[in-house]
Amino acid sequence: IDYDTYREELPEVPVDEWRKKSYDVISSILEAGESPVVENGSGLDVDLASALIGSEYAKIVNNAGELSYCNGPSHEGLGLALMIRDRERTFSSDSAPYAEYTLECATTGKYRMWAHAFMWGRDRSHFDISIDDTRYTDADWLKPGVWAFSCENTWRFVPLIDVELKKGTHRLKVHFLDPMLRLDRISFTACDALPQRL
């Protein structure tokens, strides 16, 4: 981690204090990948950078070095997001690197899935999502053309799709198609609720 790069986010904090806090946050994100994401009272929140740990519960697959991390706005600006580092590289749905996570749903029900994303540029899909064996693309999203939010040039929660999940274990995959994307969280909420603030 290049602490000097992240340091620019919080210039008023003494360097040693900032480094300690940053280290603690990054450690907690990675440690979250050592177990399944368990539903809490408001849904499920997946810190995508937890896949950097490479465990059976959170890992990066089909990567060949393409997926990397960058700073993200979660955890008071000390969080991490995932991205494709090579700005010239794009992928088809079949060849895209992806991050995979184990989810544990406490109840059977309908959930709204959200992506906390920063996108820019091309008017094409930047990512796909798979839940268990079902793949969802921007043609399936609640508001087709999720990429349209890229014109805002800011981080925002984007509603993706409403899905029925049964109580028990599920596999979430986030397929990265385009380098003009940063993702730091996927959240599942009740269909009439908003995701928790970061």
Image (cartoon, grey):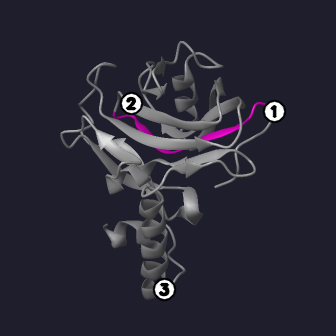
Mark nearest the camera among 2 and 3 is: 2
Query: In the rendered structure, which amino acid carries the disc numbered 2?
Result: His
Can you see residue 154?
no
Which quadrant of the figure contains the C terminus? bottom right
Number of residues whose C-alpha sits closer than 10 Å to that of mark 3, classed few (under 14), some (14–19) or many (20 or more): few
- Return the residue at label 1: 192
Q: Which residues are magenta?
A: 179-191
* Residue in front for this viewpoint, 124 or 113: 113
**Residue most toward the top?**
139
Q: Point out the frontmost of discs 3 and 1.
A: 1
Q: Is residue 130 magenta?
A: no
Residue 72, position in %: x, y? 48, 54
Up-down: is 165 above or below 189? above
> Residue 19 location in percent, x, y?
42, 79
Instruction: Looking at this view, name the residue that lies furthest to the front.
Output: 168
User: Which one is nearer the viewer's eye here, 104 or 49?
Assistant: 104
Q: Which residue is mark 3?
A: 17
Q: Residue at x 53, y 40 (%)?
A: 117
Quarter of the image that includes the N terminus: bottom left
Gap in angstroms between the C-alphas marked 1 and 2: 26 Å
